[in-house]
Amino acid sequence: MMAAYRAMRLGVLMPIHDARDPVEHAHVLRDVFEKVLSGDRSRVAPRSLVSASWQRSLAAHIDPDLRTPPVVLADAELPDMRSAHPLNEVMPLLRSTLVSIADEAMHVMLVTDADGTILWREGAARLLVAADGVGLSPGTKWTEDAIGTNAMGTTLAVDAPVQIHSAEHLVRTYHTWTCAAAPVHDPDTGTILGAIDISGPLHTVHPAMVQLVSATAQLAENQLRVRLAIADERLRVRNMPHLVSLRGSAGALVTPSGRIIAGEPYGAWPERVELPEGGDRIQLVDGREMIVEPLAEGYLLRAPRATTTTRRSALSLRLMGQAAPTATLNGRSLPLTLRPAELLTALTLHPDGLTAEQIALSLYGEEGNPTTVRGEILRLRGQIGTDVLRTRPYRLDATVDTDFEAVRRALRAGRPADALRNCGGSLLPRSDAPEIRELRDEIDATLRRMVLATDDTDLLVTFAHHPLGRDDLEVHELLVDTLDEADPRRPEIVARHTRLLADA
């Protein structure tokens, strides 16, 4: 078949937008298909996009009589794959943009990963049955080398929006279908994350289909770009103390993918650097050698001369949520038990320092013993260093950033969404220390109040899945009243609301 294809004499090209009757056009395409594969001459030729795709597919030994695509993911694997995939963040946008249109136009919406595996599918129930019959279902692979020419596989192959109609599919099973797809790119690296597709019966073909999925893909990329900017700002805020600790020496904060998001001096840095695998030094394009220090999230570039004798230590504390509290000191991770975490919290809240008596009152109340505190401070100094935890009074001699302070800053600025993103849960939830308990209650109550006061349904749904809102009956009651019946998030919210009512 491949030899016959290559020997074909091309005739007049017949693009989709020239066809007024999609069914009649499908007959023409089917005639072209059969003649091309048999090696006969055809009056019209496939579009160049289709021609190239057929060539790639046949080179991959795809049989036009193949029935359905291979299943590469079991149903049990799909939830984890979806939750870990970057496009999971924009699924609400895709549903609101495409699903209602797809329902009305008798189409299904499909979203794949970069390997062409369908992870999500939405559409009218009556069409999903037909889609199941031809393998248009989650877990199946749709690259050209798996199932031949199709919109999803071809858009991934050419990295551009495409529309494939009827017999332009290489596999005959799909000659009664039409589909359009567009790739979605990672705004960070520019690589393809996956494809968005709408597919339906051949009589539903419309030239605007490809423009619709292309525009939707651009909307998805824009939302990912906004989320990336927010993540960059969060990383910048959390890790700026590391850059400040260089005290004016050259340095930069770098994302895990190698993008520079802050640098000193300003403007003296490339947009991106290639991080070494297993190494601790890189050379910039201008010849400068920089030391690469891993941080809790990302990296710090610093000049070799910026040693620990000339720069202040940088201490990052992650103390919110059910996970064990942790400290990161100059790029080195330090696990913490509850008592050291409480001491560090108290010292962070009082940067000018505290006496043993004041710490005892803060952490133990009126029954606190300063002698006990001195022993605990001594052990903590052995863990983080005497140059970081000073005495007379007890204070942190380091540039400190904490997750709870990032949440407080966002709340003071009136940004509950940013606060929620920075919040892993309640502050040291197992602590009974009076000052920590008071601060924990203040943060939890303020965040909850600000989320409830917004009109942002997506934020409210996020809060309902957050540790602070998971068991909040009022939040779930509000969502039950707010979410549309067709919203795919509603069943889970309703189920949890029912359980909370039963437990009340």
Image (cartoon, rainbow, N blue to C red):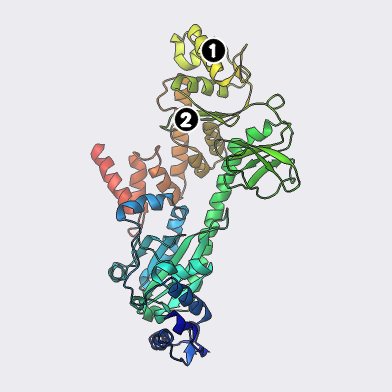
List the residue tagged with mark 2: 442
The residue lying toward the viewer, choosing from 104 and 26, is 26
Local crowd at mark 1 within 10 Å, few (<14), some, or many (≥20)? some
Q: Quadrant of residue 25?
A: bottom left
Residue 230 visible to the viewer:
yes
Residue 105 visible to the viewer:
no
Q: Residue 126: x percent and y percent?
A: 28, 70
Asked if labels 2 and 1 touch by Cβ distance under 8 angstroms, the answer is no
Name which residue type carries label 1.
Leu
Q: Residue 234: x percent and y percent?
A: 57, 41
Q: Residue furthest front?
A: 3
SS at circle 1: helix
Q: Is residue 81 above or below residue 150?
A: above
- Kindly identify the residue that appears in the image at 40 percent across and 32 percent down: 322
- Kindly identify the residue that appears in the image at 68 percent across and 33 percent down: 244
Q: Is residue 435 left or right of residue 147?
A: right
Find residue 378 and name its label.
Answer: 1
Q: How many marks?
A: 2
Q: Residue furthest top?
A: 371
Local crowd at mark 2 within 10 Å, few (<14), some, or many (≥20)? few
- Kindly identify the residue that appears in the image at 39 percent across and 52 percent down: 81
Q: Is residue 201 above or below residue 266?
A: below
SS at circle 2: helix
Q: Residues under labels 1 and 2: Cα distance? A: 30 Å
Name which residue type carries label 2.
Glu
The mark nearer the N terminus, 1 or 2, is 1
Q: Residue 35: x percent and y percent?
A: 41, 88
**Which quadrant: the N terminus?**
bottom left
Q: Residue 235: x percent and y percent?
A: 58, 41
**Which quadrant: the C terminus?**
top left
